[in-house]
Amino acid sequence: MFPGAGFIQILINILILLLIVRAIFSWFPQMLYSEAGRIIVLATEWYLAPIRRVIPSAGGLDLSFLVGIILLYALQAFIGSANILVALLVIVRSALTFCIILVLIRVFFGFFQMDPWHPITQMIMQVSEPFARPFRQWFPRRPREFDWAPVAALVVLLGALFLTSILPVG
């Protein structure tokens, strides 16, 4: 670790915290217009705006703050280890974890017969379908039957996460 790395990591942690607070504030739109909300937006928009130009929203969900947090964790891992492979593995593992959570939510929605027209259900279905699509030839979707393609996708994603977690690095 180089001199000043600890200070940079503290700054990264502060920015990650600000991004999390901004995400929480976005669930309560009136919070973004409060004094604290304006300060949070001012402190994070410089970082999120370029990410938002590259990463479009998915299913009406702004993913820029998640991508921003993943990139900051990768930068923090690189600063701490000086190993680019460690930073890349942080990115891959974080992305896999996010995808696993989305597909797991979709599987739960299938168990609980969620309203297919509810906006959250539609968003989860739309965002997670690219993971289920490769398994449709083995598990076609039938009306009023449980959808097994997301379960197969979940198993594959969990396997990929396991494989990346046992990789020897450095």
Image: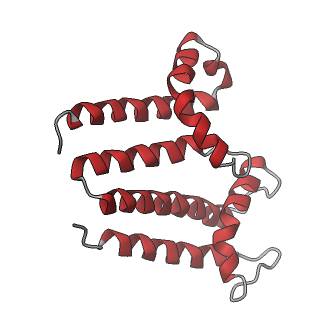
Q: Residue furthest bottom?
A: 138
Indicate the position of residue 2 as horizontal and vertical percent values: 18, 41
Residue located at (37% from left, 62% from top) = 89
Q: Nearer the viewer, residue 22 or 108?
A: 22
Q: Nearer the viewer, residue 84 or 38?
A: 84
Residue located at (73% from left, 51% from top) = 59
Indicate the position of residue 155 as horizontal and vertical percent values: 51, 77
Q: How is the image coloured?
A: secondary structure
Indicate the position of residue 14 as horizontal and vertical percent values: 37, 29
- Screen quadrant of the N terminus: top left
- Screen quadrant of the C terminus: bottom left
Q: Nearer the viewer, residue 85 or 62?
A: 85
Q: Quadrant of residue 113?
A: bottom right
87 relative to 17, above or below: below
Indicate the position of residue 8 as horizontal and vertical percent values: 29, 33
6 relative to 66, above or below: above
Residue located at (52% from left, 47% from top) = 67
| 52 left or right of 16 in image | right
Q: Quadrant of residue 6?
A: top left
160 relative to 69, above or below: below
Number of numbered markers: 0
